[in-house]
Image (cartoon, coloured by chain):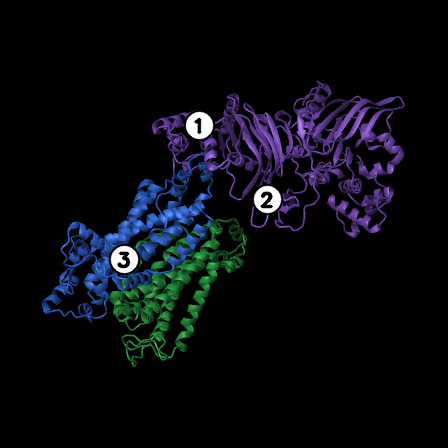
Chain colours: A green, B blue, C purple
C-alpha cells in the first residue's frame, strides 16, 4: 500500500502552517545568536529600559538586552526539545523493535518495564532530579527521554509484531534473510510514519516541560530559558513591562508549541486515513 | 488463574512504580554530592542551628532502612520543613484540598464539555461548525498553560480587575458561609479557566476522532435501521464506543496535566501543592520537595490504577487498558 | 404488504465523478413470496436493501419511487422513516458481529426496539429472550456480548433482532454466508416459515444454490440493471439470459457437472456525468470506466446492452439503443435478441448412405454460447449429425436453420459467408492435415481459401494469434515445421488453431481427443474449454465417452440407432437418466456392463 504521503502532506494546511512556523523559529534559534547585537549575559546596560533603537525590546531587571535574551532562550528550548525528542524516539524504537523481534520472556520483561516507567509521573521524577542535582539541561532532556520512551516502544512493538507475522516478511525469512536484514530492509522503513509522529509529539512535550520546569525555577538561573523569562517578567508586572518583556517570550513559546502541535495533528491525520475527510 | 492475572497485573505494575518512586526518594538525598545537609536550604535565607542540623541528619542518615522509611511514610512522618517551620505532612495536607478542588473541577468540566462537544462535532461532520470547532481547538491546543495563564492574569485580574490575582480566598476576612463560597469561586475562576482551556482541546479532539471512527461502524447503521431516535443512536451506541479511546489515552496525557496544574497554581499564587512546591524549590527545602513529589506521585498512581478498572467496566472485550 | 420499486436510480457522488449503482430498477415484492436478488459484487444489491430502509450514505443521490403498500417511502424525512423502520421493514445485514454494538449484550440489543417503543423493560427482555430461544439461543448465550458468540449464534441473533417488532417486510442480506451447515439449514427453515406466515421477503445473495432452493422468483442484477427475472426453479435448467447462464456455469453447485467457467472480459464501473440540456433538466450521462481507470475523460461509448462486451451472442444491434424488458416464456429478459438465441435448429433431419440408415429423422437445437455433447456408441449416427451441422454432408430431408437463416439456401447462394462461421476439428489430427504443408500454412489455409484477408501481414498476425491461443510457439522455427515432426497433441492443437483462426461462431469437434494419450487429452480439453469461454463459441462436441461429456457439456444429447433418444442438462442426464441406452452408457462407463452378465469385475 504505497500511498502518496508526500503529496498529501504537502497539501495539508495545518502541516504547511506548522512547518513554516517551526522553520522560522528554527532559523531564529540557529542563526539568531549570531545576529543579535548583544551578549545576553552582558549586564552593563541600565536595567528596565523601555524599547529603544539600541534595545528593540528594552532591558530586563538585571540590565540584559531582552531581545538577545529571547533568542538565546529560544535556542535553549529548541535544543532541549530536539534532544529529548530524538533520544526518546531512538530509545523507544530500539526497545520496541528488540521487544517485538526477540519475543518470549525478553519481550515480557521489556513490556513490564515499560508499564512501570509509563506509570511514573514523569514530571515528578524530573522535579526530583532537578531539585536535588541541578543537572544541565541536556542531562535533563536525556532524563525526560528515559521516561518518555514507553509510548514509542509500545507503538513500534505493536506494528512490528503485526509486520513480523505478515506474509512478505515470512517470505523473506524463508528466502534466507537474516534478522538484521529483515529489520533494516523491511521493518524500519515501514515504521516511518510512526517515527515522524512520535518525534513531533515528543518534541512538543519536551518543549512544554522545559518551559514549565524553567518557570518553576528548577533550572540553573544562569541558563536562559523562555519559561524563566516569563517567570521574572511576571514579577515586575506592575511596571508596565508586559508588552516588551512578558509578551515576547509568551508569544514565541506559544508559536513554538503551536507549530509542533499543528505538525503532529497533521501527521496523525494523514497517516490515519479514516480521519482524512474533514479539516 | 486467568482472572487473577487480569485483575492483579495492573495492581502489581502500579505498586512497582510506587515503590520505585519511594526508593528513589529514599536514596536520593544520599546521592547528593557533598554533604546533603548543607546542600539543603543552600542559597536561601534559612539558617539552621546545630539542633536542627542534627535532627535533619538523623532523619535522613542513620541506619534507617527502606522498610522503616516506608513505615514512616505510612504514618505520615515525612520530616520537618525548616523553611516553613512545620511538619511536611501538615503542609501537604493543608495544600491538598485546594489542589483537589482546582484540578478535580477542571478535569470533570473539561472532560464532560470536551466529550459532548466532540461527539456533537463528529455527528455534524463536514459542517462549518465542525470545521471551525476543530480548527479553533487545534489552535487552542497549541497554547500552553503558561501562556494562557499569564494572559488571563494580565487581562482579567491585573488590567480589568474583575477577578483577584492571587490566593484561594480573601485572607483574614470575616465571611459568612455564603460569602465565603462566592469568594472561593471568584478566586477559583481564572486558574480554573486556564486549566480548562488547556485540557479541553485534547479531550475534544480525541472525542471527535474516536466518534468519527465509530460513526462509520456497521453497528451504527444497524442502530439507525432499528428506528431508534437519533439521540439514542448518537449516545447509547456511537458515543459509548467512542469513549473507549478517550479513556485509554487518558493516562498518557497525565504528564501534561500535572505539569500544567503546577504552573497554573504558581502563576495565580493559588495555595495548592503547586505553589507549595514552587516555594519549596526556591528555598531548596528538600524534605518538603521530596514529600510533595512523592505523595503527589502516589496519588497519581492510584488515580491511574482506578482508570484501568474503569476501562474494564466500559469495554467487555478487554482484560485491562494496556 | 407489497413493496413496489419503480424506476429507481441511485448513484454515489464523489468529489469529481459519480458512481452509478442502480439504473432505473423496477421490482415488486409481494407478501408470502421470497424474491431473490442475485448478482456479483458491484451489481448494486446491497444498495437496494439500504435504499428501501432509507439508510443510504450521505453522498448517495436517489431518483424514482419506492412504495410500501400505498405509501411512498423514498424521500421520507427521518422521523417519517423511523416510523417505518424495523416495525414495518426490517433488515438483516451481512456483516455478522460487526453489525452488533460490542458493548451491549445480545438480549439488550434484541429488546432495544421494544423498549424504545415504550414497552416496559421486563416485558421487553422477556419477549427478546423468548424470540432468541426460538432461534436456538438460550438464556445464557443471550446474556453474552457479541465477541463471545460464534458466527452461527450471531446470525440467529440478528434474525431474532429483526423480527422483534414483527415487521411485514424483511430484507435479508447474505443471511447464510460463511455459516456452518447446521446453522444454514436452520436459517433456511426459519425463512421458509416466515414466508408461510405471509411476510414479504427480499433475499439478497450471491449464493445461487440458496436462491434456487428458497426463492419464488429471482431477479438477476448486472451493473445496476435487472437482466432477467425468472421463477426460482428455472435458474439452473432454463436460464434465458446469457448472463444468467454464465452465472450458473460459474457456480459450484453440488449436482453440477461441467467444470466451472468464468465470464470473459471484466466488469466495469458506471460513472455518471451530469449534463444540463437545453430544456433545463439535468441529464445523467452514463459513462463506462474500467476498474483501474477511475477517471476517464470524454463521453460514454455507445449505449446499448451492458453485458454486450462479454456476451457470447452479441450482434451489432446490441450496441445501440436502450434495451427494454421482454418476455421469454415465463421469464422477463432484457436482451435485444429476446434471451439466449438459437444458433442452430434442425427439424427432422435424416440421412442414409445407400441402404444404411445413418440418421433417422432427428431434431436438434443448439443455443448460443453453450457446449452440447452428442454421446453415443459407434453407429449411433452422431458423426453424421455433426457432419451435417458442419455443412459437410447434405441431409436427405429436414430443415436446417443456422443463425436464423435456412442453411440449404445459404450454402447454395453464398457459401463463402457461411464457411467462416463454422469451424471443425476431427478425430484423427494427423490425417486431417496435409503432410506437405508447414504449421504456418496449415493454420493460414482457411484464410486463404475464404479470402477473408488479402493482406499477408494481417494473415500472419491472425495466424500467430491463433497459435498463441492454443499455447503453441510462434517462433519462426516452429512455423516452418511439418506435422510429422510434432507429437499428436501438438498436431491437434494446430488443428484447433486452424479451426479458430477464422473466428467461427460454431465449433464442431468430432471426438477430438480420443486418439490422444489421457494426459494430453486433459490438457487439450482444458484449453478448448477455456477458449470456448474466451471467444464465446458455441460448441458441438461428439464423443462416445459419457464420462468425458459430463466434464465438458452444458447439455447432453444421447444418440442410439440414428436418433437422439434423450436431451437435457448434463447434470440431469447423468444423475437421473431416463432412457435405457443412457443408463447403459453410464453403467458401462462406471465399469458395470449390464449387457454381459457373465462377466463381472
User: Are there few (<14), some (14-19), or many (20+) residues within 10 Å of tag 3?
Assistant: many
Image label count: 3
Between tags 1 and 3, which lies in front? Answer: 3
Q: CA distance from mark 2 to mark 1?
A: 35 Å
The disc label shown at residue C332, or none: none
Q: Residue at x 81, y 24 (%)?
A: C347
Q: Label 2: chain?
A: C
Q: Residue at x 61, y 49 (%)?
A: C294
Q: Label 1: chain?
A: C
Q: Please, is residue B243 above or below residue C251 in the view?
A: below
Q: Quadrant of residue C227?
A: top right
- x and y, in percent, of residue B197 in the image: 33, 56
The disc label shown at residue C19, or none: 2
The disc label shown at residue C165, or none: 1
Q: CA distance from mark 1 to mark 3?
A: 54 Å
- x and y, in percent, of residue B252 in the image: 35, 53
Residue bearing the label numbered 3:
B191
Q: Would residue C246 be found to the left or right of residue C384 on screen?
A: left
**Front-most of residues C503 and A247:** A247
User: Are there few (<14), some (14-19), or many (20+) residues within 10 Å of tag 2?
Assistant: many
Q: Label 3: chain?
A: B
Q: Please, is residue A40 above or below residue B133 in the view?
A: below
- Callout 2 touching callout 3 (CB < 8 Å): no
Q: Secondary structure at mark 2?
A: strand
Q: CA distance from mark 2 to mark 3?
A: 54 Å
- Which residue is at the far bottom? A44
State whether residue B13 appears in this view.
no
Amino acid at each position: 500500500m504505497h500511498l502518496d504521503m508526500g503529496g498529501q502532506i504537502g497539501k495539508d494546511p495545518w502541516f504547511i502552517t506548522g512547518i513554516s512556523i517551526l522553520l522560522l523559529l528554527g532559523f531564529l534559534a540557529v542563526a539568531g545568536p549570531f545576529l543579535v547585537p548583544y551578549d545576553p549575559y552582558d549586564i552593563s546596560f541600565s536595567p528596565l529600559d523601555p524599547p529603544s533603537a539600541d534595545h528593540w525590546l528594552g532591558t530586563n531587571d538585571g540590565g540584559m538586552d531582552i531581545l538577545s535574551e529571547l533568542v538565546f532562550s529560544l535556542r535553549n528550548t529548541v535544543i532541549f526539545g530536539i534532544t529529548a525528542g530524538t533520544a526518546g524516539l531512538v530509545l523507544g524504537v530500539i526497545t520496541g523493535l528488540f521487544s517485538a523481534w526477540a519475543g518470549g520472556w525478553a519481550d515480557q520483561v521489556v513490556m513490564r518495564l515499560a508499564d512501570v516507567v509509563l506509570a511514573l509521573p514523569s514530571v515528578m521524577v524530573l522535579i526530583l532530579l532537578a531539585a536535588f542535582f541541578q543537572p544541565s539541561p541536556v542531562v535533563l532532556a536525556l532524563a525526560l527521554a528515559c521516561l518518555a520512551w514507553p509510548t514509542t516502544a509500545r507503538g513500534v512493538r505493536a506494528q512490528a509484531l503485526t509486520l513480523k507475522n505478515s506474509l512478505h516478511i515470512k517470505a523473506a525469512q524463508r528466502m534466507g534473510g537474516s534478522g538484521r536484514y529483515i529489520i533494516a530492509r523491511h521493518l524500519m522503513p515501514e515504521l516511518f510514519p510512526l517515527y515522524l509522529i512520535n518525534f513531533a509529539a515528543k518534541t512538543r512535550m519536551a518543549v512544554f516541560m522545559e518551559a514549565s520546569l524553567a518557570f518553576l525555577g528548577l533550572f540553573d538561573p544562569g541558563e536562559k530559558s523562555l519559561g524563566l523569562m516569563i517567570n521574572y517578567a511576571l514579577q515586575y508586572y506592575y511596571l508596565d513591562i508586559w508588552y516588551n518583556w512578558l509578551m515576547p517570550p509568551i508569544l514565541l513559546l506559544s508559536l513554538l508549541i503551536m507549530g509542533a502541535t499543528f505538525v503532529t495533528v497533521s501527521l496523525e491525520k494523514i497517516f490515519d486515513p479514516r480521519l482524512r475527510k474533514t479539516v | 488463574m486467568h482472572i487473577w492475572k487480569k485483575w492483579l497485573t495492573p495492581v502489581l505494575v502500579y505498586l512497582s512504580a510506587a515503590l520505585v518512586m519511594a526508593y528513589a526518594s529514599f536514596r536520593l538525598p544520599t546521592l547528593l554530592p557533598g554533604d546533603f545537609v548543607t546542600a539543603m536550604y543552600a542559597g536561601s535565607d534559612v539558617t539552621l542551628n546545630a539542633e536542627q542540623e542534627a535532627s535533619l541528619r538523623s532523619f535522613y542518615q542513620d541506619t534507617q532502612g527502606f522498610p522503616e522509611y516506608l513505615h514512616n511514610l505510612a504514618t505520615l512522618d515525612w520530616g520537618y520543613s525548616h523553611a516553613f517551620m512545620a511538619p511536611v505532612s501538615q503542609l501537604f495536607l493543608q495544600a491538598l484540598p485546594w489542589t483537589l478542588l482546582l484540578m478535580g473541577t477542571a478535569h470533570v468540566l473539561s472532560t464532560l464539555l470536551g466529550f459532548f462537544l466532540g461527539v456533537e462535532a463528529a455527528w455534524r461532520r463536514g459542517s462549518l461548525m465542525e470545521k471551525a470547532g476543530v480548527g479553533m481547538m487545534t489552535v487552542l491546543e497549541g497554547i500552553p498553560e503558561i501562556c494562557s495563564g499569564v494572559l488571563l492574569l494580565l487581562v482579567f485580574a491585573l488590567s480589568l480587575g474583575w477577578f483577584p490575582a492571587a490566593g484561594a480566598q480573601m485572607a483574614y476576612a470575616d465571611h459568612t458561609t455564603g460569602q465565603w463560597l462566592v469568594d472561593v469561586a471568584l478566586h477559583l475562576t481564572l486558574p480554573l479557566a486556564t486549566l480548562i482551556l488547556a485540557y479541553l482541546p485534547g479531550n475534544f479532539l480525541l472525542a471527535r476522532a474516536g466518534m468519527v471512527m465509530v460513526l462509520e461502524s456497521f453497528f451504527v447503521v444497524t442502530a439507525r435501521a432499528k428506528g431508534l431516535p437519533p439521540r439514542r443512536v448518537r449516545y447509547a451506541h456511537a458515543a459509548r464506543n467512542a469513549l473507549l479511546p478517550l479513556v485509554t489515552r487518558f493516562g498518557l496525557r497525565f504528564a501534561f496535566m500535572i505539569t500544567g496544574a503546577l504552573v497554573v497554581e504558581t502563576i495565580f499564587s493559588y495555595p495548592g501543592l503547586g505553589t507549595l512546591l514552587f516555594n519549596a524549590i526556591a528555598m531548596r527545602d528538600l524534605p518538603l520537595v521530596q514529600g510533595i513529589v512523592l505523595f503527589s506521585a502516589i496519588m497519581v498512581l492510584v488515580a491511574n490504577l482506578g482508570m484501568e478498572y474503569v476501562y474494564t467496566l466500559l469495554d467487555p472485550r478487554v482484560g485491562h487498558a494496556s | 404488504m407489497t413493496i413496489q420499486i419503480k424506476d429507481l436510480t441511485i448513484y454515489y457522488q464523489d468529489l469529481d465523478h459519480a458512481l452509478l449503482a442502480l439504473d432505473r430498477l423496477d421490482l415488486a415484492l409481494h407478501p408470502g413470496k421470497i424474491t431473490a436478488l442475485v448478482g456479483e459484487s458491484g451489481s448494486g444489491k446491497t444498495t437496494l436493501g439500504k435504499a428501501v430502509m432509507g439508510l443510504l450514505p450521505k453522498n448517495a443521490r436517489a431518483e424514482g419511487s419506492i412504495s410500501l403498500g400505498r405509501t411512498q417511502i423514498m424521500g421520507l424525512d427521518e422521523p417519517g422513516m423511523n416510523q417505518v423502520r424495523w416495525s414495518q421493514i426490517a433488515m438483516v445485514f451481512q456483516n455478522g458481529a460487526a453489525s452488533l454494538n460490542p458493548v451491549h449484550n445480545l438480549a439488550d440489543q434484541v429488546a432495544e426496539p421494544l423498549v424504545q417503543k415504550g414497552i416496559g423493560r421486563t416485558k421487553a427482555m422477556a419477549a427478546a429472550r423468548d424470540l432468541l430461544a426460538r432461534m436456538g439461543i438460550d438464556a445464557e448465550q443471550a446474556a453474552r456480548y457479541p465477541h463471545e458468540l460464534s458466527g452461527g449464534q450471531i446470525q440467529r441473533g440478528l434474525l431474532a433482532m429483526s423480527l422483534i417488532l414483527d415487521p411485514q417486510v424483511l430484507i435479508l442480506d447474505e443471511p447464510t454466508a460463511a455459516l456452518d451447515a447446521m446453522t444454514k439449514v436452520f436459517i433456511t427453515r426459519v425463512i421458509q416459515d416466515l414466508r408461510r406466515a405471509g411476510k414479504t421477503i427480499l433475499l439478497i445473495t450471491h449464493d445461487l444454490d440458496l436462491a434456487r432452493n428458497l426463492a419464488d422468483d429471482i431477479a438477476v442484477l448486472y451493473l445496476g440493471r435487472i437482466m432477467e427475472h425468472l421463477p426460482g426453479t428455472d435458474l439452473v435448467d432454463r436460464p434465458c439470459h446469457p448472463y444468467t447462464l454464465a452465472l450458473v456455469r460459474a457456480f459450484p453447485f453440488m449436482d453440477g457437472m461441467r467444470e466451472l467457467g468464468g465470464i470473459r472480459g471484466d466488469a466495469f464501473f458506471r460513472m455518471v456525468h451530469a449534463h444540463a440540456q437545453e430544456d433545463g433538466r439535468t441529464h445523467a450521462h452514463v459513462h463506462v470506466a474500467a476498474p483501474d481507470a477511475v477517471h476517464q475523460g470524454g463521453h460514454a461509448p455507445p449505449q446499448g446492452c451492458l453485458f454486450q462486451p462479454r456476451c457470447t451472442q452479441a450482434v451489432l444491434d446490441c450496441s445501440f439503443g436502450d434495451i427494454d424488458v421482454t418476455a421469454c416464456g415465463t421469464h422477463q429478459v432484457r436482451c435485444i435478441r429476446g434471451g439466449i438465441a438459437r444458433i442452430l435448429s434442425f427439424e427432422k433431419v435424416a440421412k442414409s448412405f445407400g441402404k444404411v440408415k445413418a440418421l433417422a429423422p432427428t431434431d436438434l437445437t443448439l443455443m448460443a454460447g453453450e457446449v452440447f455433447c452428442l454421446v453415443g456408441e459407434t453407429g449411433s449416427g452422431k458423426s453424421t449429425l455433426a457432419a451435417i451441422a458442419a455443412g459437410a454432408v447434405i441431409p436427405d430431408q429436414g430443415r436446417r436453420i443456422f443463425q436464423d437463416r435456412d442453411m440449404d439456401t445459404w450454402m447454395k447462394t453464398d457459401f463463402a459467408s457461411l464457411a467462416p462461421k463454422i469451424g471443425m476439428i476431427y478425430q484423427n489430427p494427423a490425417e486431417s492435415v496435409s503432410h506437405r504443408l508447414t504449421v504456418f500454412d496449415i493454420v493460414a489455409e482457411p484464410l486463404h481459401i475464404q479470402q477473408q484477408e488479402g493482406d499477408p501481414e494481417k494473415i500472419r498476425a491472425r495466424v500467430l494469434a491463433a497459435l498463441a491461443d492454443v499455447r503453441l510457439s510462434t517462433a519462426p522455427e516452429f512455423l516452418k515445421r511439418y506435422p510429422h515432426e510434432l507429437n499428436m497433441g501438438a498436431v491437434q492443437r494446430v488443428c484447433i488453431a486452424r479451426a479458430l483462426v477464422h473466428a467461427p461462431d460454431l465449433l464442431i469437434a468430432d471426438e477430438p481427443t480420443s486418439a490422444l494419450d489421457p494426459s494430453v487429452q486433459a490438457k487439450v480439453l482444458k484449453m478448448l474449454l477455456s477458449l470456448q469461454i474466451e471467444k464465446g463459441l458455441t460448441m458441438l462436441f461428439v464423443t462416445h465417452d459419457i464420462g468425458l461429456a459430463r466434464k465438458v457439456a452444458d447439455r447432453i444429447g444421447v444418440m442410439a440407432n440414428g436418433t437422439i433418444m434423450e436431451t437435457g442438462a448434463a447434470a440431469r442426464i447423468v444423475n437421473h437418466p431416463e432412457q435405457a441406452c443412457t443408463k447403459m452408457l453410464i453403467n458401462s462407463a462406471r465399469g458395470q456392463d449390464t449387457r454381459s452378465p457373465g462377466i463381472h469385475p
